Image: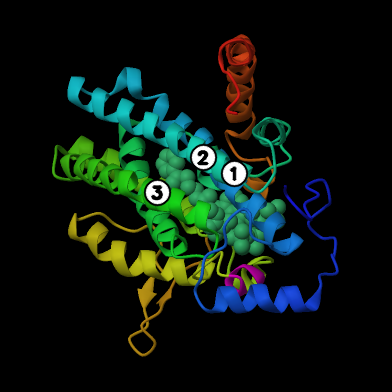
Amino acid sequence: MYGNLSIIEPLTDQVQEDPERLAEFEAHIDRGEKIEPHDWMPTEYRRQLIRMIEQHAHSEIIGALPEGTWITRAPGFKRKMALMAKVQDEVGHAQLLYSAAETLGKPREQMIDDLISGKSKYSNVFNYPAYTWADTAIIAWLIDASAIINQVTNSKGSYAPYCRALERICMEESFHLKYGYDNVVVLATGTPTQRTMVQEALNRWWRPIMHFFGPPDKASIHTEKLVKWKVKMATNDEMRQQFFNQYVPKILELGLTIPDSELRKDPATGLWDFGDPDWDEFKRVINGDGPCNKERLAVRKTAEERGTWVRAALKTADQKYVTPLA
Ligand code: BYC
């Protein structure tokens, strides 16, 4: 069913494709047409998609943790309800994305194993702690904003199941963004203590948010290929620039300070210059050495272990009660 797929092959392997088929595939993509799971695709396209969609799914399920720890401590019943709904949405996004990745042939169990063993990556930002309620507000506003920029752009891409998942996810994310903005506004226009709290949270998250869009284009190993095949519809730097354009004015409007003295827009090019966000820290964090990497994976591992009996029960129920379609 999955044609030329061999998911165990490392990504660096070169697979010799039939040049005619490859040209036909690329012409299809150049015309802006979508690829469905049953269509022929180059092995490298399939492997890149599995890598990216799987990492995205892991980011959603791990991303539920920093905010999730605040459900019991949310200030007031309404905020608790809203945060609970948001965290539940994030887990739902993971479900959609794991399903999209499964259409490419990698079983969900293997994806979860690769997450827990540290083989698969997930977004750098979720390896940082949410110290205060203000951290959750900044996550919901600015990390969801960053995610929307990435996902709205890539939802116009070439692989149809990923695009469909992204469209649905973006609708929910735009609600999260409004919820996050509302929380930030309350703090930024509140007491001096609240203003300090939200400023400190912004200071903590700014660098990780810069990293969220990925390394600079000149250091990105996958961008060229992914842009060519319309998996990524913009480069890492282009998306980071879009974030500056949209969100720097909104942050300043609230009287908050951006913790980068070098950030400024070049009037000639319209591009933002920014200080070095410490790319060494980015590398350390995505390779397992961030402040919370171990804790996040340990929580996920425990959840998997505790859920074993549920999955076993569901499997038995499936075999017992579901009659295969004729
Ligand atoms: N974090 O060649 P590059 C959410 C890795 S969750 C970690 O530029 P690419 C939310 C990259 O994987 C939404 N790793 O890669 C949830 C590669 O390593 P490998 C999260 C990163 O793929 C809960 C290496 O660095 N969004 O919104 O062309 C609550 C070289 O990079 C990161 C997504 O997952 C990073 N930030 O571009 C609230 C979007 N950046 O695989 C909110 C989907 C790079 O060779 N992903 N790396 O070992 C993408 O759009 C792209 O994969 C990226 C990177 C733009 C992130």
Residue 148 visible in rendering: yes
226 part of magenta stretch = yes
- Is the CB atom of the residue marked by disc 2 within 8 angstroms of ligand 1's nearest atom? yes
Residue 62 shown left or right of residue 172 in the figure: right
Task: Please give the name of the residue rendered at 30% of the width and 65% of the height, measured from the top-left corner.
Answer: 246
Q: Are marks 1 and 2 in contact (CB under 8 Å)?
A: yes
Which amino acid type is marked by label 3? Answer: Ile
State yes or no: Cβ of the residue under disc 1 lies below 8 Å from any atom of ligand 1.
yes
- Where disc 2 sits, the SS reads helix
Marks 3/2: CA–CA distance: 10 Å
Disc 3 target residue: 143
Give the residue number, with chain letter if any, for mark 1.
Answer: 122
What SS does tag 1 mark? loop
How many marks do you count on the picture? 3
Q: Mark number for residue 126? A: 2
- Which residue is nearer to you in this view: 87 or 246? 87
Question: Picture coordinates of residue 223 (x, y %)?
Answer: 62, 68
- Given the current orientation, which residue lies at the most extreme front position? 326
Q: Amino acid at mark 1?
A: Tyr
Is-magenta flag for residue 96? no
Predominant SS along the magenta part: helix
Q: Earlier in the sequence, mark 3 or mark 2?
A: 2
**Residue at position x 59%, y 25% from top?**
300
Would you place residue 101 above or below residue 70 in this image?
below
Would you call the spot at circle 1 few (<14 residues within 10 Å), some (14-19), or many (20 or more)?
many
Q: CA distance from mark 1 to mark 2?
A: 8 Å
Q: Position of residue 188 (x, y in %)?
A: 19, 45
Screen quadrant of the C terminus: top right
Residue stretch rendered in magenta on the structure:
225-229
Residue kind at label 2, given as amino acid type: Phe
Relative to 209, is 237 above or below?
below
